[in-house]
Amino acid sequence: MTENDTNGTVAENGTPVKINHHDDADAEDRADKEVAVETEDAPDTDEKAIEDDPFLALEKELKAAREEATQSYDRFLRVSAEFDNYKKRSSRETADFKKYANKTLLKNLLGVVDNLERALDVSQTNADSKGLIDGVEMTLAEILKIFANFGVTPIDAVGEPFDPALHQAMQQEESDEHPENRVTQVLQKGYLLHDRLLRPAMVIVSKKIQQ
């Protein structure tokens, strides 16, 4: 066959033969698609290897199990720490409740102590009241002993610097015996319940003498 000027093909007998270039392009496209389909359908090399090798599959499962175990252990540690903190907090709250549960009762009994102490102060000037004084002193001592058992202690105030957390200033007075802002006299005793204030001491506080 020979090629003429019109891009056609002529057979040896002179008959023109038409070549369809589109058929060739279609054939190439079909071949490319078949290759692509085969590539997509082909399983991943690693996955196929795992499927073919049971030891690789077992190793993969073991790795996943280890990761899950690590995560579970981390969660266990967090929960354990939270529970431990809860137990400590609960224990502190329970101890505080037991420690200060009688606060109201003990505070009300302070008035009884005040009255007994006043009775003793008044009776000291009367010699005929010795029996009464002894009875009052014994009663006061028993109450103070109960207070001590429950953690109630008096506040030492005279001569101490004025502390608004412990003292309630009722008045100020000029003094040359005490530095400024010192407790010179206690009008009513103050008490602590363990480390908490049960009742402030009512006091008189010193100040500088005005020139």
Image (cartoon, rainbow, N blue to C red):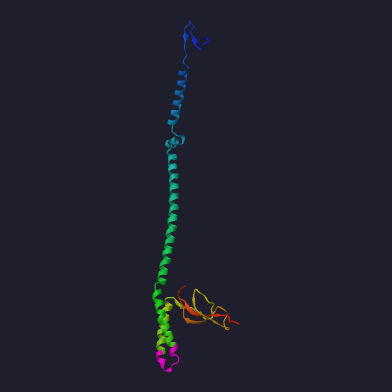
- Residue 162 is a magenta residue: no
Relative image position of residue 187 (x, y in whole percent) = 47, 82
- Residue 131 is a magenta residue: yes
Residue 67 visible? The answer is yes
**The C terminus lies in which quarter of the figure?**
bottom right
Q: Is residue 41 above or below residue 17?
A: below
Quarter location, residue 40? top left
Relative image position of residue 47 (x, y in whole percent) = 44, 36
The residue nearer to you, when weighing 136 against 58, is 136
Q: Is residue 29 above or below residue 166?
A: above
> Looking at the image, which residue is at 44% across and 50% down?
71
Q: For the view shown, which residue lies furthest in the top direction?
A: 13
- What's drawn in magenta, residue-wise? 121-132
Quarter location, residue 130? bottom left
Relative image position of residue 97 (x, y in whole percent) = 40, 69
Say how many tags the image has.
0
> Looking at the image, which residue is at 43% across and 57% down?
80
The residue nearer to you, when weighing 44 against 150, is 150
Q: Is residue 91 above or below residue 189?
A: above
Q: For the view shown, which residue lies furthest in the bottom direction?
A: 128
Relative image position of residue 167 (x, y in whole percent) = 49, 76
The residue nearer to you, when weighing 198 against 136, is 198
Q: Is residue 149 above or below residue 128?
A: above
> Looking at the image, which residue is at 42% across and 87% down?
119
